[in-house]
């Protein structure tokens, strides 16, 4: 990724949030140091949902107005979302092992998140398998929209099913159930990871523009 003011600011914000989480945020009473994985795991999950939500919105708009830029946005956001979902699937087991006594259990949220990862991995494979730009964009848009429909079920899974995951600590009807220092660190991590997502999305979109321009030039020459 080419260094830009946005990417530099994003990386700096992530470093600051991680330093605060590791060195300046108190340990949780029962989970100890393992709980600090929260400050990577939860923001990564939020960004993954944000990324796939943007895929769905851009895909829906593409199917309506057939604007190639929307297809590029969807493609770029899907790839960035897969990266953050991979972070979620790595940090989750690392957190689960000391707390739950196992790296993996097939409860609803874990299983649905893994399924979401496979859907958008399939989305990327689909884009690589189709040569016709119009067909690729249309089929990918449909899959991108359908995949995002899984996000609300992942969020609500802790209410709908028996699961080892705790209920949300931020998105709840009452006040967030975290001490103020931990809450500040978590909100900072959410903001910094969102900024990092924006930087990665912008870089990936620029690559898509340059790639498509190069293909158009080669096609014209041919």
Image (cartoon, rainbow, N blue to C red):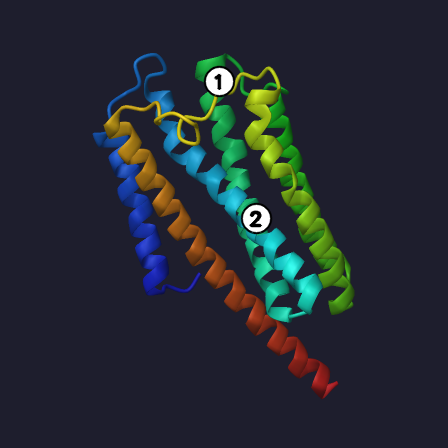
Image coordinates for residue 171, horizontal then vertical, percent: 44, 31
Q: Is residue 195 left or right of residue 12?
A: right
Which of discs 1 and 2 lies nearer the camera? The answer is: 2
Q: Which residue is mark 2?
A: 53
Q: Which quadrant of the rendered structure holds the N terminus?
A: bottom left
How far is disc 1 from disc 2 in space, using C-alphas? 30 Å
Q: Is residue 113 visible?
A: no
Q: How many marks?
A: 2
Residue at point 64%, 61% (across, down): 61
Label 2 sits on a secondary structure element that is helix
Q: Is residue 204 left or right of residue 60?
A: left
Image coordinates for residue 69, horizontal then vertical, percent: 59, 69
In the rendered structure, which disc, 1 or 2, sits on the residue that comes first in sequence?
Answer: 2
Q: Which quadrant of the rendered structure holds the C terminus?
A: bottom right
Residue at point 65%, 58% (across, down): 59
Q: Which residue is mark 1?
A: 97
Q: Is residue 165 visible?
A: yes
Image coordinates for residue 30, horizontal then vertical, percent: 34, 12
Q: Residue furthest left?
A: 24
Residue 27, numbered circle:
none
**Circle 1 crowding by C-alpha within 10 Å: few under 14, some 14–19, many from 20:** few
**Circle 2 crowding by C-alpha within 10 Å: few under 14, some 14–19, many from 20:** many
Q: Nearer the viewer, residue 87 or 39?
A: 39
Image coordinates for residue 65, horizontal then vertical, percent: 67, 68
Image height of 189 relative to 57, above or below = above
Label 1 sits on a secondary structure element that is helix
């Amino acid at each position: 990724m080419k260094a830009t003011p946005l990417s530099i600011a994003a990386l700096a914000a992530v470093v600051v949030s991680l330093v605060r989480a590791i060195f300046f945020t108190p340990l949780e009473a029962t989970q100890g140091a393992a709980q600090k994985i929260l400050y990577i795991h939860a923001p990564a999950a939020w960004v993954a949902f944000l990324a796939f939500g943007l895929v769905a919105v851009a895909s829906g708009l593409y199917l309506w107005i057939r604007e190639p830029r929307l297809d590029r946005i969807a493609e770029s956001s899907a790839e960035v979302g897969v990266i953050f979902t991979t972070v979620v699937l790595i940090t989750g087991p690392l957190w689960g092992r000391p707390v739950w006594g196992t790296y993996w259990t097939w409860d609803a949220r874990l299983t649905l998140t893994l399924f979401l990862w496979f859907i958008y991995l399939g989305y990327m494979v689909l884009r690589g398998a189709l040569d016709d730009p119009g067909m690729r964009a249309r089929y990918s848009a449909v899959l991108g929209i359908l995949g995002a429909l899984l996000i609300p079920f992942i969020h609500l899974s802790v209410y709908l099913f028996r699961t080892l995951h705790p209920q949300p600590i931020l998105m709840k009807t009452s006040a967030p159930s975290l001490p103020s220092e931990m809450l500040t660190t978590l909100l900072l991590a959410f903001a910094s990871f969102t900024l990092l997502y924006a930087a990665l999305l912008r870089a990936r979109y620029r690559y898509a523009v340059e790639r498509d321009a190069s293909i158009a030039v080669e096609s014209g020459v041919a």
